[in-house]
Image: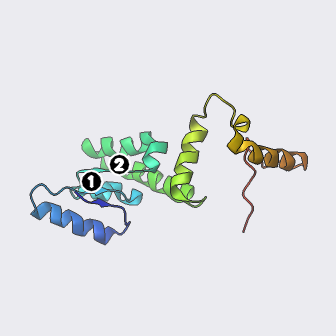
Amino acid sequence: MPKDSGGAKETLEAYLQVAKEVDGFEVYSCPDHLVLCALQNGAADRISGPGNAIPQVLAGILKAFNTGEIDEAEKQQAIFAAFRTDLYALGFAPAMVKRALFLQDPPPVRAASLPCFRTQSRTARSWQSSGNTNVQGDVPPRPDR
């Protein structure tokens, strides 16, 4: 059972072709922009990092596909792909997914009180005291490069 994380539609199609020809061979698709394509072509299921951050959208693709509502599945697929593109543009993919999850459900302890966040919080305060209005929470804005 391979997990295809490469992102190339051609690779996904090749794996799916093998799955059609070899008994017991299942493909678990990872490229987030190809969820619907993979399902339409016989993928057993999907594995997704961003799916943890917006499970309702990933579930929407699967539900719409399973009920034959392809227009809705395509709409949900477009939302899912755009979220992934925007999220990953911010930095290292796994870290961005974890940050998105943290922002949705922060721990009951203020992050600024944790030792690993103290430096970041002081930085945020210095940005705020300098009149910067782009600071959200305890994280200073990322400087343009």
**Residue labelled with disc 2:** 73
Q: Residue at x 72, y 69 (%)?
A: 145
Mark 1 secondary-structure assignment: helix
Mark 2 secondary-structure assignment: helix
Q: Looking at the rendering, in which quadrant would you find the N terminus? A: bottom left
Position in image of residue 55 (x %, y %): 43, 41
Position in image of residue 9 (x %, y %): 33, 68
Q: Mark 2 vs mark 1: give the one in front.
A: 1
Q: Is residue 142 left or right of residue 72?
A: right
Q: CA distance from mark 2 to mark 1?
A: 11 Å
Residue 39's disc number = 1
Residue 94's disc number = none
Position in image of residue 53 (x %, y %): 49, 44
- Pointers 2 and 1 in contact (C-beta within 8 Å): yes
Q: Quadrant of residue 16?
A: bottom left
In depth, the one of 103 and 121 nearer the eye is: 121
Q: Amino acid at mark 1?
A: Leu
In depth, the one of 92 and 57 nearer the eye is: 92
